Each structure stands twice: as structure tokens, then as C-alpha cells.
Amino acid sequence: MPFVYTTNLSEVRALAEQHARTAGLPASRVTDFVIAVSEVAANTVRHARSAGSMDIWFTANEMVCEMRDAGFIPNPRAGSEPPSRDASGGHGLWLVHQVCDRVDLRSDENGTVIRMYMSLP
């Protein structure tokens, strides 16, 4: 069952850390995962202005975190390239792409879904 959040980002981070440790990620990758989840959750709070949901699962090979909100990201490649030096935004999704092994982003009039993948040892 997905965890729903509005402004309780400390709970989002704690839950992400708990799942990452349970999945067996090494300590440095746990930190990376928590940072990525925190960035996406903060974007929900700041930009989507809606509740967000987080669902985490893992297989033998990878851990997946799916985050949803009612916001819209017009650029389907957001975060896949570094923001310009003078950009006032876009750094969070860029960071997510740097620390995760794979990031999938889908966004339309129904909302945004971001899946972050971390390979397991």
C-alpha cells in the first residue's frame, strides 16, 4: 500500500531509509536512495501542490521506488541533462538521475509518476 505524504518529508525519508536497508543496499547507496526520494518528494510539495504517494518494492536484482502526484512536468526528459549554470531550478531531478541507476518519468494531465531504480548487490 503506498505511503501518502503532504509535507511530512521526514517520514518519507525515514521510510525510504528503512526499505533501502531492508533491501540490502550498502550504506552509501542507502544515502543516495534517501536523497533521491527526498528530492522527488520535495518537488511534489513545492510544485505539484498536491499530496504525493510513494510505493517501494524490490526483487532479487533491484529496488524500485514509485512516486506519484497530481503535478505536470512538461519536459519528459527533465533531469536527464544538467541544468544550465544560471538555472533557478532543475537541479533536484538532475541529482536524482545521478544517484539512481535508472529513472523513468511519465507526466500528463493526470499527474506525474517517477520510478527510481537501484541495483541490489
Image: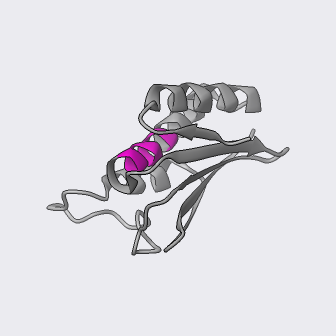
Above or below for 53 versus 115: above
Can you say whether 116 is above or below 107 in the image?
A: above
Judge whether residue 46 is colored magenta.
no
Q: Which residues are magenta?
A: 37-45
| Foreground pick, 70 / 96 | 70
Within the image, what quadrant is residue 102 found in?
bottom right
Question: Foreground: 73 or 62?
Answer: 73
List x then y, in percent, for residue 7. 41, 35
Q: Residue at x 39, y 43 (%)?
A: 42
Of helix, strand and loop, which mostly describes the magenta segment?
helix
Above or below for 4 versus 46 = above
Residue positioned 75% across, 33% down in the render:
23
The chosen color scheme is one colour
Query: How far across and how far down the image is residue 28, in percent?
Result: 55, 30
Quadrant assignment, res 63: top right
Name the residue at 48% across, 59% down. 70
State left or right for residue 87 relative to residue 105: left
Reply yes or no: does residue 42 show up in magenta: yes
